[in-house]
Amino acid sequence: MAVLVALALTATAAACGGDSDDSSSSGKTLVMWTFKQSHVKALEKVAEGFAQETGVTVKVEAYGPDDVFVTKVQAAAQTKNLPDLFEVHTTGDDFAWGAAGLLTDLAKDVDDAWLNSYLPTVRQDGLVNDEFYQKSLAQDAKTKGIQVGQRWSVPLTIGTFGIVYANKQRLTDAGVTTAPTTWEDFISTLQKVKAKNPDNGGVTIGFKAPTTGLEWFMQPMAYGLLGPDKFHALFGKDKSSNFSSPAGTQVLETYGQITPYWQAGTQSLDIDAADLAFAQGKSSFDIGGTFTLAFLAQNGMDPSNVVTFPVPAPANGAVKDLSLAPFTLTGVSVSATTKNRDGAIQWLKYLAKADVSATFAKEALDIPPTDLGADPSTAVGPVLGAMIASFGSGPSAYNPGDTSYRPGAYDGVPVASTLMDFSPLKKKSAADTGAQMAKQIDAFWAKQ
């Protein structure tokens, strides 16, 4: 996203420039850019219904991966050739590009009736609150200029981390007929599958990005084991309750039970490579997020051969009904230069309809932000439905988007790298690992 610094310098001219040969379309056609190839066909499918209903055509164009997409937007801003709509990383691209003058503020358009289409936990995503405004005041902030109350996007896809993917056939072959609901069940399942498949019965995760092990896997389990307050205290200054404490050692020893079941070599895999190993049958379990399913399908994994479940809490944990709090992954923004703002707003409202979002979800293998009722499986199928069923809110829900308990200068990479020395690398004991993690977190507190 460093390119956004340069983008900000040209954005005002791009947003306010005169006539040009721009990508946004006038009249009855809208152009939408996305960085997700897996969303193109899904957006095109729902656009067919939109055209029938409104007479407005939506042309979808994909530019990826992310860095290519950002470069494309930068170039379009410089040449005043922006499209009508963007799919964006929520609270990322949308805030940066809104601050740079590339987007339309949707605050006055998105009323309560529209918001009520979305799940309560994601209704405010895309809206600038005081937390994001305060962050924008930092000297090197890419969102400098945003104001509280501005809305730069509305949700398109939501999800979370902490989803376990399992090979359904291998579970069946090992005599496992139901998804694990406790940590102990999970370890037992791993034992059974590994015994049946000694060469490829293990777990992969993208440890080349070390925070995956910490944030996608250990933290949800630790939240369920300790409960909200004691979990938050792991990242605090108090030695009686941080990672160097008995509670920290308990978390690490519990997490360490996974060590015998890591697939050989997973410590050197990036996220895509770990997912690909699972899709190709080189492992039997994969730790990811709700967004992982589409990648698996793109790489040959039959979704019907996938069982998903959230990282479970120990049976004796403080949270008995652990769930995962979803957050918006991607949203849709309207360009400041569109010649058909009304049509663009109509498109956003159309995407927020429950039946439309369900159609999009099934095609994209991604989770929509809308309320699909008590049994979402009837709308989007069993795999997506199972992931949606793992969502929750309140104290029993682990929320990866909540970072309020960590120091402002916190960087998860060195902490997660220390955790890797414990598992999978087996270089340190649980107690030594916890002491080192606490020391690293203390250093971040000292910077405040």
Image: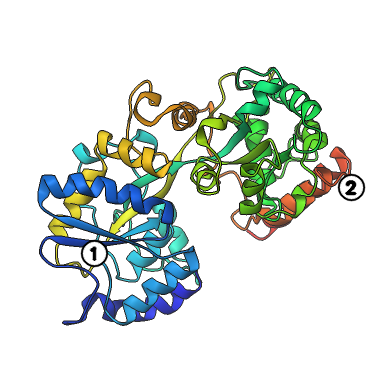
Local secondary structure at mark 1: loop
Local secondary structure at mark 2: loop
Does residue 78 appear to the left or right of 171 in the view shown?
Answer: left
Residue at horizontal 16%, vertical 82%?
19
Let me know if residue 427 appears in the view. Answer: yes
Let me know if residue 110 appears in the view. Answer: no
Q: Which residue is mark 2?
A: 427
Q: Quadrant of residue 410?
A: bottom right
Residue at horizontal 89%, vertical 40%?
429
Dot 1, crowdedness within 10 Å: few (<14), some or many (≥20)? many
Dot 2, crowdedness within 10 Å: few (<14), some or many (≥20)? some
Q: Specify the amino acid type for callout 2.
A: Lys
Residue at horizontal 78%, vertical 30%?
194
- Which x, y percent locates residue 114? 22, 40
User: Quick check: marks 2 and 1 in contact, CB under 8 Å?
Assistant: no
* Nearer to the camera, 240 or 162: 162
- Which x, y percent locates residue 242? 74, 39
Q: Quadrant of residue 69?
A: bottom left
Q: Which residue is mark 1?
A: 84
Question: Which quadrant: the C terminus?
Answer: bottom right
Q: Is 161 located above or below residue 85 in the figure? A: above
Does residue 393 appear to the left or right of 227 in the view shown?
Answer: left
Q: Specify the amino acid type for callout 1.
A: Asp
Q: Is 187 located above or below residue 284 in the figure? A: above
* Nearer to the camera, 225 or 345: 345
